[in-house]
Each structure stands twice: as structure tokens, then as C-alpha cells.
Image (spheres, grey):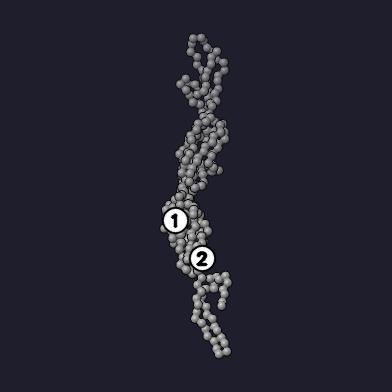
Amino acid sequence: TLIVRTATLADAGAYTVVVTNALGQTTSQAATLTLDAKPLITAQPQPSTVVAGAGAQFSVAASSLTPLTYQWRKEGSPVAGATSAVLALSNVSAASAGDYTVVVSNSAGSVTSAIARLTVITPPVITTAPQSVTVTAGADVTLTVAYSGSPGTIAWRRNGVVLAGATSASYRIVAVTKADAGTYTAVITNAAGKATSTGAALTVLTVPAVKLPPNVFGIVGRPLGLQIQTDSSATYGATGLPAGVTVNAT
């Protein structure tokens, strides 16, 4: 009697026994030992990151003495028709992202692979555009943008020119001046594409510097002319006076 304890795949094969006495020896017919063991995964599926609309592929390698079957799963649920060692996905979308595994089986049992995560990069979409604003010189202004899709980089522009260091969802201008006036846009970029917000107009109003004449005297009942000097930033209303300026006579 030959006892093979805790048999492994290495113990499989054809066994014979040689019986010997004083007159000679004889060899038995071969007895084949076949081990029906669970599959052994030799190469795990690997994580993958792809752009939306592209294809993705996972694969697994396993060894077994008996035929193998495969069933791929996404988040624990079987993927219909995915019953080979390779899982090929085409035209992936955000819904395709998740954790994938494969169950490899034979007549002795089954084994589940390690998790392979599929990350799908989706293009940015502006959900909240910066809003136009009118302020007086010296005030603080904050422009904001919001977007959906995979994370990306943000670049603010004024009149189409990139603003150095303006790379967050909010762009703050402290104590605005006339030089800050213009049209602002935010450009979001990731591996799947680029989105540009609608323009937000920043209008900066300045209070004109007004120089009034010294005391002016006139004759009651007769017209009186006043000459008022202002800087170039002044705008004039229907009365002919700079906007925001009134004359009180006493």
C-alpha cells in the first residue's frame, strides 16, 4: 500500500509497484493518479484607466488539470456573455466604471481573481458659468465656475489672455481698477476634452474727480454759468453735469 498524504499537482502521474522475491521480480500495471484541484490563477487582471468612448480590456491566466470556465463580474454581478479569459469592453462610458473580477472554475471548484478597477475619464461640462458684474473701483470681486465630469485643470482668461496663477474654481480680484475691466472666461481641461465657460463681463465704474470754481456771484433773475472741471473718467447726465454730481445754490 502506498499512501500519498496531502496530494499536490506534483504528485499526479502513473504509479507502478515492483514486487521482488528470491526467484525474481515483477512490475505491476500502471495506476494513474489524477488530481482534481481548484484552478490556480497565475496572472491577475490589472486596473485600467481609459477615456470615455474608448475600449478597455481585462485578462486573466490560470492553470488547471481539467477544463476551465470563466465568468466576469462587475461589482459582484455577472457580466452577460463575459465567459472567456479576456473581457473586452467597447465604447465605455461613466456607467462602465467600477470593480471587475473573474471567477475561474473547474470540476473541483472555483477561485475568484483580485479586483481590477476600471476608471473612465469623462469630459468636463460647465454647470455654473461666471456671472457678469458691475462694481466701483476699489471694490473686491470674486468670479466662480463649477463643472461636472472627471477632475481637470482650470485656467482663467481675461479678454482671451491667460491669467497667471488663476487656476482654482474661484478667481478673486482685490481692489479692482479700470485695468481689470474686461470679459472673463474659465477653461477646464482633462484627458477627455475641454470646456470653456461663457464670458462674464467685469465693468468697473470710477468716481470722477471734480474741481469746482471758487465763489461765484450772479444777478438774481439772470442766467449763471458754472465751469466744472473733471477727469477723463467722468460721464455726463442729461443736466450736463458729471454723473453723481449736483449743484446746490443757496
Instruction: Give the mark, 1 or 2, whose residue is nearer the N terminus.
Output: 2
Tell me residue 49's x, y (percent). 49, 54
Q: Amino acid at mark 2?
A: Lys
The N terminus, quarter of image: bottom right
Residue farthest toward the bottom in the current orientation of the protein: 23
Nearer to the camera, 129 or 115: 115
Q: Which residue is mark 2?
A: 38
Helix, strand or loop for disc 2: loop
- Determine the residue positioned at 49% across, 69% down: 65
- Determine the residue positioned at 50% across, 34% down: 202
- Residue 79: give its label: 1
- Determine the residue positioned at 56% across, 77% down: 2
> Alpha-carbon neighbours of circle 1 within 10 Å: few (<14), some, or many (≥20)?
some
**Marks 1 and 2, how far apart in space?**
22 Å
Kindly report which numbered mark, 1 or 2, lies closer to the viewer in this rendering.
2
- 239 over 139 or under it: above or below: above
Helix, strand or loop for disc 1: loop
